[in-house]
Image (cartoon, rainbow, N blue to C red):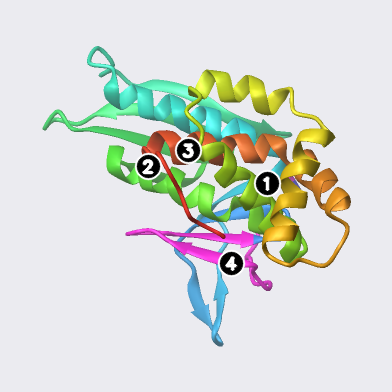
Amino acid sequence: MSSLANSVDINIAYCDIYSLKNYMIVAYPNFLVLGNPVNNNSDLKFHKNSYLKIPAAYFEQWYLEMDKCIKFFDDQSASAKQVKTIFEDRDFTYYWAGVTDIKNEKFVDISGGHESGTCVYFSFNKNEIENLLVGFSEILMKVFCLNVNVYRCFYFTLNNFLLTDYSNEEMKQIIANSDIEGFSDLCKKCCEKNNIQGDWFQFAEIVLRHKINLLIIYLIKKTMLKIDSILFHK
């Protein structure tokens, strides 16, 4: 079965939940799910063909495509349907299409399915897409089930970057070119400040492995929330 496919029920222990107005984003080990779960004996259950699945390996591509969706809303000339592939694996593909309805309100339709037809469909206006991205940034790291002190070092590093005055393009280069020395210095400061016992250099190695996710969260928070300073996840 494709790692993207939604042809089975999901009824396993989850890591965390982020609630949107009409949907939930639920973190499971190594993937996120967007949809409307049902209550199943005090647990959550997603029925097959009712959810959108985002494996961790596709987080960067998902962010890039959702960023294009935001630009669609701001493009005054974009009114016709534009079908774009979000990601695909074997015989299962997710698409998005920008559409304008008869009242001239723009929507982004996200659908997924096999060559034989669509089996999942969501529609979002601009505010809903922005909230979806914010929720994505808040919960994506939970799928990796990291040690709590690694999370603290990760978010300490993120907060440090968010407090700078660099442009998004400059920060892309800074994070892309970061090495273990830069991250280990920040992780050491985090451990000293919060009296964390453990190998801060090892924590830094893990943060370094997640620098793409660090950049994704940075860009969403800086752009979507227009944050000049942040105190989340101290």
Span highlighted in magenta in the image: 2-27
- Give the distance between the C-alpha atoms of the residues marked 3 and 2, in whole angstroms: 7 Å
Q: Residues within 10 Å of mark 1 (few under 14, many from 20)?
A: some
Question: In terms of secondary structure, what is the magenta stretch mainly?
Answer: loop
Tell whether label 2 touches label 3 (CB within 8 Å).
Answer: yes
Mark 1 vs 3, N-terminal side:
1
Residue 16, disc: 4
Please tell me whether mark 1 or mark 3 is closer to you in this view: 3
Q: Is residue 189 visible?
A: yes
Mark 2 vs 1, N-terminal side:
1
Residue where numbered disc 3 is placed: 220
Question: Where on the picture, by quarter, is residue 76?
Answer: top left
Residue where numbered disc 1 is placed: 55
Helix, strand or loop under label 3: helix
Q: Residues within 10 Å of mark 3 (few under 14, many from 20)?
A: many
**Residue at 77% over, 51% down:** 188
Q: Nearer the viewer, residue 110 or 127?
A: 127
Amino acid beneath label 1: Pro
